[in-house]
Amino acid sequence: MVFQMFPARLFPLVNAFIMSVIMVFIMTAVITAVNTGIENGFVMRWSQAFVVAWPIAFVVILLVARRTQSFSKKLCSID
């Protein structure tokens, strides 16, 4: 038996949420560390960058996910 937390119709939102959180978490950490170093206040600077970047990433993924999936399928010869 598979546990289903959300209905299937919410898949695009759940997928965009998870993908955006993971990408923004990693990218803001790396960019903040490169630009300012991992010193005092790193977590605060990182969290501020995350709060700014996450909503943007979430909306962009919602807007382009289907198109990029279709394009990727064509590039990979997947029907």
Image (tube, rainbow, N blue to C red):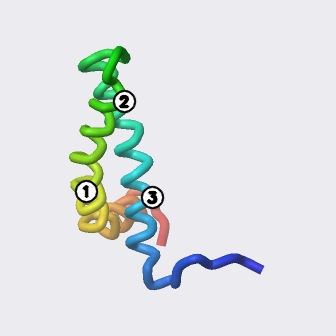
Q: Picture coordinates of residue 38 (x, y %)? A: 37, 17
Q: Give neighbour class at mark 2: few <14, some 14-19, many 20+ (Cα, 10 Å).
A: some
Q: Earlier in the sequence, mark 2 or mark 3?
A: 3
Residue 56, picture quadrant = bottom left
* Three-letter amino acid code at the position of disc 3: Ile
In this figure, what is the number of numbered marks?
Answer: 3
For mark 3, give the secondary structure. Answer: helix
Q: Is residue 26 left or right of residue 48?
A: right
In-front residue for pair 76/53:
53
Q: Residues within 10 Å of mark 1 (few under 14, many from 20)?
A: some
Q: 37 or 11, which lies in front?
A: 37
Looking at numbered disc 1 in the image, what kind of residue is underneath it? Pro
What kind of residue is marked 2? Val
What SS does tag 2 mark? helix
Instruction: Answer with mark 1 or mark 2, whichever residue precedes in sequence.
Output: 2
Across and down, in percent, residue 15 comes to: 44, 65
Q: Is residue 62 above or below residue 33?
A: below
Q: Which residue matches tag 2?
A: 43
Quadrant of the snapshot with the N terminus: bottom right
| Closest to the observer, 60 or 37 | 37
73 w.r.t. 37: above or below: below
- From the viewer's perspective, is residue 13 above or below residue 47? below
Give left or right: position of 57 versus 13: left
Quadrant of the rendered image containing residue 28: top left
Q: Pointer 3: what residue?
A: 18
Q: Residue at x 25, y 39 (%)?
A: 48
Of marks 1 and 2, the one in the foreground: 2
The residue at 32%/61% (across/down) is 68
Task: Give the left or right position of residue 32, taking residue 5 as reference.
Answer: left
Residue at 40% x, 62% y: name it.
17
Q: Which residue is mark 1?
A: 55
* Distance (Cα) linking label 2 and label 3: 21 Å
